[in-house]
Amino acid sequence: MAGIHKKCAMARPWGAGLTVPAALLMPLLMPLSGVGSAQEPSAQQEPSAAQEPSAQQQPSAATHTSALGFYYSRGKYGESSETRIRYLPVSHEVAKGSWRFKATVPVLEIAGPANVLVNVGSVGGFSGSRVSASDIGDVSFNLTYQVPAWSTDAPFIDISVEVKAPTADPEQGLGTGRMDAGLQIDLYQLAGPLTVFASAGYRYRRQSPFYPGLENSLFGSLGASANWGDALQYGLIYDYRQAASTFTGETHELLPYLSWAASPDWSVMLYTVSGFTEDSADFAAGVQLSRRW
């Protein structure tokens, strides 16, 4: 359609950088957060002559996206025995105009040395302790503003703020027991058949008596995606995270993914995570089912 500048629909997978990515969460990844389409200012501000004034002034209706995910990872993270993580997040996002708000409530199971945390990663310093627990994880809230496109060639820009509520039990090794917050900027650019994207952010972590040595950290990602027909999209994300603790190092991971739009309302995404440092999982994979309504 002439005069319309569209951003490819993408979803950030849960999982990279887990332990869970900058993405997913990336978030991510995550995520590359659910993205709809955006119109350039001229297309938004110049309705057709057939439209009535009253229709022009009606505010756009809110859209809802519900998602159910499952993530599994295993790795030694520099220890002598493995840590296994199963993470099942349920999320709901409401989008209206340039704003999106999402809440995520996860169920979490961890077994292994008590030195790996979901959405934090390896925190080290606990090789003598072990956990085997499952319960509610940390609930998170994310608010995103999509900067209006100023031309057909300009990149799309999203600015997000996330707050993590400490609902996971730190005594079972499921969380830090402290509230965290993060700021993230995402950029998307159409380049022929590809959508190229990048993210950068900063994570603030309050000190925890259960996990001394936690640090604030930077994170970022680069990636590209392409469509395969009308229903399939595939892509590759490189994810970087600065060390989250004085006891550990940074992580570098690759996240290939495949997304299938079964209908205009339903989509399924599959992804795997390959780490290149001692503080990354040896194996990780996930699936995410989304419905827009």
Image (cartoon, grey):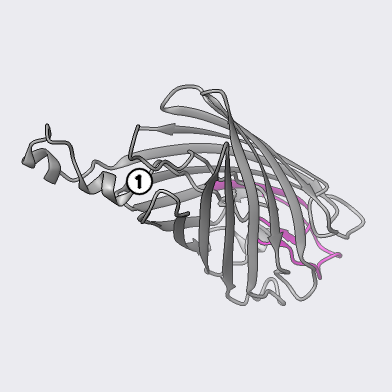
Residue 121 image offset from top left, x and y in percent: 71, 60
For the point 64% across and 64% down, the residue is: 219
Q: Is there any visible trace of residue 261 in the rendered image? A: yes
Query: Is 271 rendered above or below residue 100?
Result: above
Residue 291 image offset from top left, x and y in percent: 44, 31
Residue 191 image offset from top left, x and y in percent: 56, 44
Left or right of residue 292, residue 229 in this image: right
Q: Residue 244 falls in which quadrant of the image?
A: bottom right
Q: Residues within 10 Å of mark 1 (few under 14, many from 20)?
A: some
Quarter of the image that includes the N terminus = top left
Count the numbered circles shown.
Answer: 1
For the point 58% across and 75% down, the residue is: 206
Q: Judge by depth and name the residue closer to the eye, 2 or 176.
A: 2
Q: Is there any visible trace of residue 83 in the rendered image? A: no
Which residue range is magenta in the image?
Answer: 106-133
Residue 108 drawn in magenta: yes
Q: Judge by depth and name the residue closer to the eye, 195 or 209.
A: 195
Quarter of the image that includes the C terminus = top left
For the point 28% across and 42% down, the residue is: 62
Query: Is 190 rendered above or below residue 140?
Result: above
Left or right of residue 244, residue 7 in this image: left
Report the residue that reaches farthest toward the right.
Answer: 80
Left or right of residue 76, residue 16 in this image: left
Q: Judge by depth and name the residue closer to the eye, 217 or 152.
A: 152
Residue placed under numbered mark 1 in the picture? 94
Query: Is 28 rendered above or below residue 279?
Result: above
Q: Secondary structure at mark 1?
A: strand
The amino acid on which the numbered mark 1 sits, given as a three-letter code, is Val
Residue 261 image offset from top left, x and y in percent: 51, 26
